[in-house]
Amino acid sequence: MKSLYSLNLKEAEGIMESLEAPKYRAAQLLRWLYRVHVRSWDELKNIPKDLRDKLAEKYFLASLELAEEYENAKNPTTKYLFKTHDGHFLESVLIRQGDRKTVCVSTQLGCRVRCPFCASGKSGFFRNLTAGEIIEQIAWIVRKSHCQITNVVFMGMGEPLDNFDEVMKALEILTAPWGFEMGGRKITVSTSGVPEKIYEFVKRTDGRIRLSVSLHSPFDETRSRLIPYNRKYPLKALLATLYKIHEDLKRDITFEYTLIDGMNDSEEDAKAVAKIARPLQAKINLIPYNPIREITWKAPSEEKMKHFRSILEKEKVRSTFRKTAGQEVEGACGQLRLDRVTRR
Ligand code: SAH
Ligand code: SF4
């Protein structure tokens, strides 16, 4: 069975037609889903009971169960662990920073890329999440937290561009007037880099959705160690695509750069990063490595990280530091699930 949370307007109208219900019921249904975030059939107040019953025969109204919720007293963040209808766990995070309320969503159960520093790839790959499961994470969180969400980042578990169609569908629901009606600039999709998909992504979204590319090293040898996909899609291919996007489509790019002590934090690294970023006018988002249980790497000292940043500055490359605890949690997405999976 499919979840109603994956429907676009056209599909909802098709369903209403097949059930011999008037077309306007489609817009009514989508309002309940994407504005009110209903979770039970009797909440659909203006939809007649017989139509609800017919829908319930074919669709889940919602398919994710909230398994656990972790409030962090020190950080303005809440982590949510959800259980899918087939018994898997996934997680999402709500980050509150003043008026800005960001939800970090997962796109896959596990990740095929298997970066050694990331918890998401550690327990294998089960399946892609559906658009409905991606959207439901946000709907659940809005409902549970009573927060007006201002931003969504696709930085949880999974490689979004490896689940291209469902991610594109989720983006359609987030930005459409019949959906969440969010501005594309409020949404960021982060990728470890699949060149042909990146180009298609920027083209199909007309550059309206923010794109963030995980760089982590300007050198193939180290990057392959950190992001195994780099063996298949080395820097040369990735950068050629990014230069093409910059030239053809005139879109901004951000690089994420997780700093790991002694791995990718030298002066030579910083200079080479600047050389890559400058022609793209790209911004670098520096993230201190957030230790995961299985691995002994650590983040560089504060001083070393500042030095790295000062070199970028000297080379006229813009950078930001993802430093607050709330933001660090984004990089730690996947860890909650790993805890759960290894505890079982
Ligand atoms: N798969 C996508 C999006 C999810 S990961 C990607 O890799 O870009 C989001 C970001 O968090 C990536 O930049 C990733 O490299 C980073 N990240 C993952 N685990 C981390 C950790 N333990 N410490 C710091 N950053 C981490
Ligand atoms: Fe997958 Fe991204 Fe984690 Fe790498 S960093 S394993 S691509 S989720």
Image: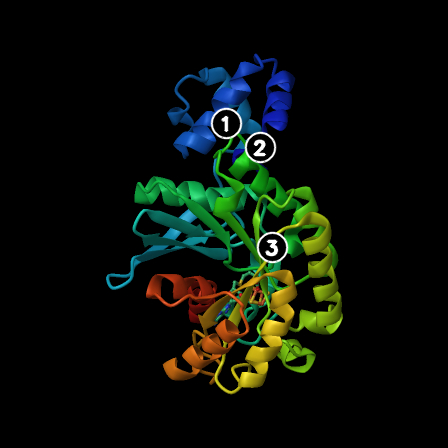
Residue 2, x across and y down, in percent: 58, 37
Q: Quadrant of the C terminus?
A: bottom left
Of labels 2 and 3, the one closer to you: 3
Image coords of residue 21 (percent x, y): 57, 13
Which residue lies most toward the left here? 73
Q: Residue at x 51, y 45 (%)?
A: 185
Quadrant of res 36: top left
Amino acid tagged 2: Leu
Q: Amino acid at mark 3?
A: Pro
Distance (Cα) linking label 2 and label 1:
8 Å
Q: Earlier in the sequence, mark 2 or mark 1?
A: 2
Quadrant of res 125: bottom right
Asked whether disc 2 touches disc 1, contact meaning CB atoms under 8 Å apart, the reply is: yes
The reply to whether discs 2 and 3 touch (Cβ–Cβ < 8 Å) is no
User: Ligand 1: does it lie within 8 Å of the C-beta at label 1?
Assistant: no
Is the residue indicated by label 3 positioned so its CB lies within 8 Å of ligand 1? yes
**Residue on which the image places disc 1:** 30
- The residue that label 3 is drawn on is 160
Quadrant where the N terminus lies?
A: top right
Which residue, given by chain and number where applicable, does mark 2 sit on? 7
Residue 228 x, y percent position in the rendering: 66, 73
Q: CA distance from mark 1 to mark 3?
A: 24 Å
Q: Nearer the N terminus, badge 2 or badge 3?
A: 2
* Side of 287 where 17 appears, left or right: right
Going by the image, does 179 lie left or right of 195? Answer: left
Residue at position x 54%, y 21% in the image: 26
Residue at the image position 45 percent from the left and 18 percent from the top: 47
Note whether residue 220 is visible.
Answer: yes
Q: Look at the picture and state if 145 lies above or below 331.
A: above
**Closer to the N terminus: mark 1 or mark 3?**
1
